[in-house]
Amino acid sequence: MPTSKDVLLARATWLNSEDIRPYVFVRPENKIDQPGTRHKLDWFTQEPIYKNPLDVKELAFANAIYQIEWKAFGHQDLAIPRWVFYDCAAMPGFIAGYAGRTKKMPKKILDLLNYSDENEWCPLSLFIIIPTMHKGEWVAYDLCSVNSLLPKEEQFYGLGFMSKAFALWYANVAQCSGMTQWGSPSLKLHANYGHMEMIGSYAPLHTHAKTMTYRCEVNTDCWEKFFSKEVDLAFLEKYGPTHLSIEPNSEASMIHIQEKIQNNEGPFYLSAGEIAHRGLRDPLTIYKLKQG
């Protein structure tokens, strides 16, 4: 019987490579105590590469991380200003991802990131999380990889998903919150780290008001289903569909659900399985906890 790791490795073959390893980019004071002990999972067996963002010798690596982020999100007016990357990510938070042995990486990637092969490791992805005042809760505010810069046939299968999964596992994150824009492909990814509670359906305070704010209790059982495509029976047992739906094309729909959230008519949840099988602009059913 194939294990979840077997299913994963069958497609994400790059995880078997000695030339690609996870990295942790965090100042010494923010290092994680007893990493990878909260969530029992056998996916991550390699020792991560450690980088200190306060060490100027790591500037080239940091610049390459920033290049991935800027090129992934700059056209959407969502790129992080350089000072925000330092003040709001490197200093208070936790940055992780995967890196490739530079001399083994395609020249196209090095050219895209303006990266020299004099450096041993080249970042391929990044995920940023920041601890909040709410004990145990972290906010995820950036996830991207070189996949967004490469044609499909040259991409590393599952790189974005695995970057976030590694960070949540390594940092022992219990509850993860985040933001994503309605109609964005990223919703199909973020819905799979735990049952997704919609705590905001409209965010006029954001640059893009048509933003959904979510949170989830991190659950590695959901991660496996992202790759296996199995039905999440635990979700269907716990939550039932309501007569409500959210329409990614309708600002009025977003505001309508936002008012219900503010009136404490929730909590409301979205189904990862439904999100996976619907188009990015299709209406999504809103679920609630079953009674009794």
Image (cartoon, rainbow, N blue to C red):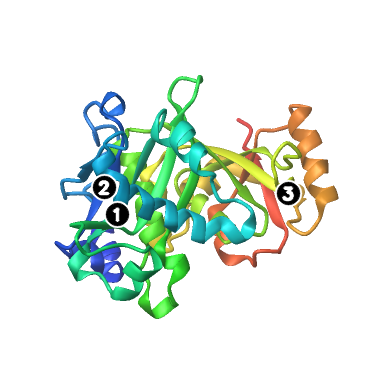
Q: Name the residue under label 3.
A: 210
- Closer to the N terminus: mark 3 or mark 2? 2
Q: Which comes sooner in the sequence, label 1 or label 2?
A: 2
> Dot 1: few (<14), some (14–19), or many (≥20) neighbours within 10 Å?
many
Left or right, 157 with respect to 234, comes to left
User: Is residue 3 visible from the viewing direction of this image?
Assistant: no
Q: In this view, does 58 lie above or below 10?
A: above
- Amino acid, disc 1: Tyr
Residue 214 at x, y percent in the picture? 59, 40
Identify the residue under disc 2.
Answer: 23
Quote the CA–CA distance across marks 1 and 2. Answer: 6 Å
Q: Which of 239 and 8 is in front in this view?
A: 8
Question: Which image quarter is the N terminus in?
Answer: bottom left
Q: Where is residue 232 in the image (x, y as percent from the top left)?
A: 47, 53
The image quarter in which residue 2 lies: bottom left
How many residues crowd mark 2 within 10 Å: few (<14), some (14–19), many (20+)? many
Image coordinates for residue 22, horizontal then vertical, percent: 25, 51
- Is 238 placed left or right of 65 in the picture? right
Percent of width and height locating residue 247: 76, 55
Q: Which residue is drawn at 36% across and 55% down?
A: 64
Q: Residue furthest right?
A: 252
What residue appears at the point 48 percent right and 33 percent down from the top-left corner? Answer: 88
Amino acid type, mark 3: Lys
The residue identified by callout 1 is 98
Task: Kindly check if marks 1 and 2 are in contact, taking CB atoms under 8 A apart as contact.
Answer: yes
* Whole-number angstrom distance, CA of label 3 to CA of label 1: 30 Å
* Res 50 quadrant in image: top left
Q: What residue type is labelled 2?
A: Tyr
Query: Is 19 drawn above or below residue 126 in the view shown?
Result: below
